Amino acid sequence: MLCPIGKHNLETASESVDSCVLCEAGKYANQNGTTDCTLCAKGSFQSAPGQTGCKVCTEEYGDDTLTSTADRTGCEVNAAFSGSMLTMLFSDGVGLAGSFGISAGFLALAGMLHLKIAQEPHTLAQLSHTQAALKSFVPGFTFGSEFVLVIGLWSEARGLAVTILLFRLLHAVCAIALIAAIYAPFRIAERLDGVIEGASKLRDDLDRKFSRANTHLVVAMLLLIVCDVMMVPLMPWKQSRFNEASRGFPSMGVLQCCSGVKTLQSLVSAACQIAFLAGSSTLDDPSTGGQAKVIFGLSITGSVVSVIGRAHV
């Protein structure tokens, strides 16, 4: 006697359907006469006994992070997705590679504009190759590392992540004010004089002819300045004594605005990172691993160096 679908019978000489038993949960039988039920495939499950097929976890619950349990009776989060974002960034080296990748992008763009400016030594303020490299790579790395940390800390310490993000946005506020002072109608620039000393004169400090000839590079640099205002010295400023003395800033007002924002933001960022590290209680926590220590250490060092550097301008 053949057992119907959904049942099986291990007794080969049985002549009664009463000898057939239901397939247990996690298994199925989709053919008559099955002697042993089939275990559901990985990623699928069956919670009820006596079934003819299995359900796919991702389709049943609409969640791509799910897979089947070992006994195929239910679903659980796939181990490949169970780690936090912080774990992924630190254990797989994604965070460190991303930070250096972003800083390399800053350096490459700044280098292209710097080489163009170097071709106009009689009219444009000049930085040495070393100064241009440092003034782009360091801000690029601090921005990149903080960007990575905000993503990684979002689920682990959201309050610290939000704090780092909000103070990083101060760069954007300062940069937008500087951009408005240069390109917005003059009446707006005059109003900004009360916020940034000499803001209305910035449009005269920027070499408009060079900017028009290299619009794509200048616009790209402005976007980087929104990310970190310490990129301001890399713009095509006209030569001046103050620019030379301040190592790239066109005026005292711009120097004070950029330095003030960078100092405050760097101090808050370093404090948040130190607070998170201090709160990591276990040695096997991903935030205390080797790669984590490197990215936290370099980020904190970059922030501290930025503060010290501003104090000596």
Image (cartoon, grey):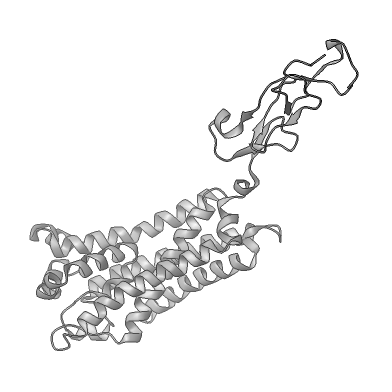
Q: Position of residue 302 (x, y in %)?
A: 47, 73
Quadrant that contains the C terminus: bottom left
**60, 114: nearer the viewer:** 60
Q: Residue at x 21, y 76 (%)?
A: 251
**132, 238: nearer the viewer:** 132
Quadrant that contains the N terminus: top right
Q: Is residue 292 above or below residue 210?
A: above
Q: Is residue 275 above or below residue 67?
A: below
**211, 247: nearer the viewer:** 211
Answer left or right for 115 relative to 301.
left
Q: Position of residue 20 (x, y in %)?
A: 83, 16
Q: Residue at x 20, y 83 (%)?
A: 125
Q: Residue at x 75, y 20 (%)?
A: 49
**169, 5: nearer the viewer:** 5
Which image quadrant for residue 59? Answer: top right
Q: Is residue 170 above or below residue 83?
A: below
Answer left or right for 1 relative to 58.
right
Q: Residue at x 24, y 71 (%)?
A: 254
